[in-house]
Amino acid sequence: MQVPTAAVLHGGADAGAGAQSSDKKDEEEVEGQPSCILEGLLETRGPGKIGRWTPGWFQLHADVLLELEPKTAFEEQQLPRRSIPLASISNLDHDSRMDEFIICFHDSKLRFRSIQTQAVTEEEDIWTWVNTLRVLVMREQE
């Protein structure tokens, strides 16, 4: 199986097409797991100017952003190495100079950037993530 490197948007071109509020059951649930709205390979780095970028396979669901180990992302029953509830996100920012986006939550922040290598540009890939996250975070905060 070839692993896509650009973000894969599920549920149509509309950024919020597959999203539902967390109190509604997703129509496309599979074995109790909510369907994924957006997934793809991203790199993350913690706060600060110095730090190592770490690749991860990310899955965006209606109420949570999951990070999986990239090499085993498609294995069944894999536990996420990080889980970020969308309700805990206090700020979402896009840095166009660096082609990255920043998620702030509690008293910390994470930086994300695209590692895509397909026809989509890194900027387009980042904007897909930013726009979809903004829609879902706004829904969670309502």
Image (spheres, rainbow, N blue to C red):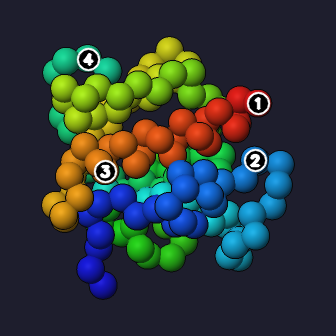
Query: Mark 3 or mark 2, which has the lower sequence index?
Result: 2
Query: Mark 3 or mark 1, which has the lower sequence index?
Result: 3
For the residue carrying disc 3, how many other residues have a C-alpha within 10 Å: few (<14), some (14-19), or many (20+)?
many
Q: Which residue is mark 2?
A: 21
Measured in 3D between alpha carbons, the distance from the residue under mark 3 to the one under mark 2, in whole angstroms, is 24 Å
Answer yes or no: do the residues labelled 3 and 2 have beta carbons within 8 Å? no
Q: Nearer the viewer, mark 4 or mark 1?
A: 1
Residue toward you, 10 or 78: 10
Q: Residue at x 23, y 58 (%)?
A: 120
Q: Is residue 15 left or right of residue 108?
A: right
Measured in 3D between alpha carbons, the distance from the residue under mark 1 to the one under mark 2, in whole angstroms, is 9 Å
Measured in 3D between alpha carbons, the distance from the residue under mark 3 to the one under mark 1, in whole angstroms, is 27 Å
- Residue 49 sits in which quadrant? top left
Q: Which residue is mark 3?
A: 125
Mark carried by residue 48: 4
Secondary structure found at label 3: helix
Query: Mark 4 or mark 2, which has the lower sequence index?
Result: 2
Position of the C terminus, as image quadrant, is top right
> Is residue 27 placed above or below 87 in the rendered structure?
below
Q: Which residue is mark 1?
A: 142
For the residue carrying disc 2, how many other residues have a C-alpha within 10 Å: few (<14), some (14-19), or many (20+)?
some
Task: Give percent across and percent down for residue 9.
Answer: 46, 62
Measured in 3D between alpha carbons, the distance from the residue under mark 4 to the one under mark 1, in whole angstroms, is 31 Å
